[in-house]
Image: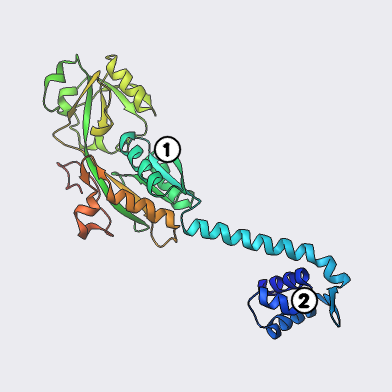
Amino acid sequence: MEMHQVRYFLAVAEELNFTRASETCHVSQPSLTRAIKLLEEELGGPLFHRERNNTHLSELGLMVRPHLQAMHDESRATKRLAMDFIQLKKTVLRVGIMCTIAPTLLVELIASIHARYPGVELSLVDAGAKELNRRLLAGELEIAIYCLPDQPEDERMHTMPLFREQMMIVLPASHPLAGKNAIRPKDLNGGNYLNRANCEFNGYAGKFFDSDVSWKMVYRSERDDWILAMVRSGLGFAFMPEYAVNDPGVVARPLVEPEFFRQVNLVTVRGRPYSPAVGALVREAMRMKWHGEQAIAVKNVAAVGRRPSRLAPSGASASG
């Protein structure tokens, strides 16, 4: 059964005249008649009785008409949904956002998407980098913004670098080290450490420190705002990305000897077909400024489509 056969049948059922029905459907009468005949053969009986100038539905035609009408209506509704999706009039985009990224820039990106593509509804998933990576591969997300400095390059992923930021030591404003321009690991020896559970450097950064440097972990949380509150209260120091430090009651100083940087990327899965909404988000991410600068992928055209290098402290190997 073809949809054009259903459409022709419904036109004849409405007009009760094959000539007028063919005009309504913009098709020749022989073509319409032939399509109706094929439909009758498939359904096993006549759908119309044609008695001179009196055309009317048969019992079979009366029985199947509401079902064929529902089929036709569903087909049209499906086409409308598909067209809205393709034209970005009404589509949901599942986006993963690394929970350690400062929200300021993300708000700007979301606002830009809403302004230029009002039909795109962003469904945001806030999680750690490794969880976002898993969900992206599993097809639970279409695109994500995160970084995994402790992971080797993954051939399955396509990454577009957005921005780079230095990792900082965060201290209460009254801390004796707050007056320094930079802080070395040995300066923190014996101090109280406040661990960010979702930090992408967990289990990775420590191996680059001297073996005689140690500190005591006194608190661990998945919430960066709680960590900042603890630092402000003088309970210890934290290791955070530069742009995530937004508490006026603390100070952030670069960690040196070694230094650590993270490169935040827009990530998709290679070879996977994507909705037009993904393209819209990519365009906006490449168009906007990230901390006052163009996305790295835009500044370095040669880097577009290439996978970024594994990030590492400057004392170990070059970062991307």
* Residue 90 drawn at (x, y percent): 51, 51
What is the number of callouts on the image?
2
The amino acid pointed to by label 1 is Asp
Dot 1: within a 10 Å radius of its alpha carbon, few (fewer than 14), some, or many (20 or more) residues? some
Q: In which quarter of the image is residue 184?
A: top left
* Residue 154 drawn at (x, y percent): 34, 55
Q: What secondary structure is found at the residue carrying circle 1?
A: strand
Q: What secondary structure is found at the residue carrying circle 2?
A: loop
Query: On the image, numbered disc 2 is attached to which residue?
Result: 17
Q: In which quarter of the image is residue 263?
A: top left
The amino acid pointed to by label 2 is Asn
Determine the residue located farthest toward the front in the rendered image.
Answer: 53
**Residue at image coords 50%, 56%:** 85
Question: As displayed, is residue 252 above or below residue 273?
Answer: above
Question: As displayed, is residue 18 above or below residue 223?
Answer: below
Q: Which of marks 1 and 2 is in front?
A: 2
**Residue at image coords 17%, 47%:** 317
Mark 1 and mark 2 lie on one chain; the one further toward the N terminus is 2
Query: On the image, numbered disc 1 is attached to which residue?
Result: 126
